[in-house]
Image: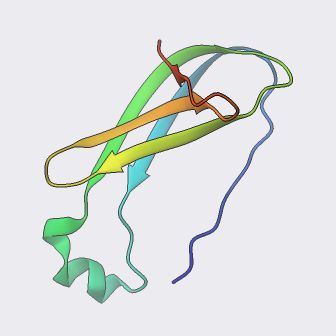
Amino acid sequence: MATSQYSRQVPAGLHQLKLLAKIGYGAPIQEILNSSTVYEAERTIKVTLEGNKTYVVKGKLSAEENAVWLEESDTGKRIEQ
């Protein structure tokens, strides 16, 4: 299994975004056998996106913390609701 990046152009303005992060495995049997490490985080935010900026979805998935957030690509600044 290889990682890949996805991008989507979204117009500037007010948006409600659903952010999702999940640990994935290359085969369904791997997910079943490793079910205790299939961490997931989901969050819905309302945000005003600015034109000519790039945003990236980031997250941390572990036994201690499951979080997902949006940040500005250039500055690394987290976007809060």
Instruction: Please state if 75 lies on the left or on the right of 26 as rendered.
Output: right
Q: On the picture, is 73 further left or further right than 78?
A: right
Residue 13 rendering spot, x and y as whole percentages? 75, 12
Q: Residue at x 79, y 18 (%)?
A: 12
Q: Residue furthest toward the right?
A: 52
Residue appearing at x 53%, y 15% in the figure: 46
Query: Residue 76 in the image: x percent, y percent?
Result: 58, 31
Q: Is residue 55 above or below residue 26?
A: above
Give me the residue at 34% from left, 83% from top: 28
Q: Is residue 62 left or right of residue 73?
A: left
- Picture quadrant of residue 47: top right
Q: Toward which corner of the image does residue 62 lie, by quadrant?
A: bottom left
Q: Residue at x 48, y 37 (%)?
A: 19
Q: Quadrant of residue 32?
A: bottom left
Count of number-bearing discs: 0
Q: Nearer the viewer, residue 41 or 80?
A: 80
Q: Is residue 7 above or below residue 57?
A: below
What coloring was used for the rendering?
rainbow
User: x%, y% of residue 29?
Assistant: 28, 88
Can you give x and y, in whole percent of width and height, for residue 21 in the image?
A: 41, 50
Instruction: Say if 58 sits above or below 45 in the image.
Output: below
- Image position of 13 (left or right of 46): right
For residue 76, above or below residue 23: above
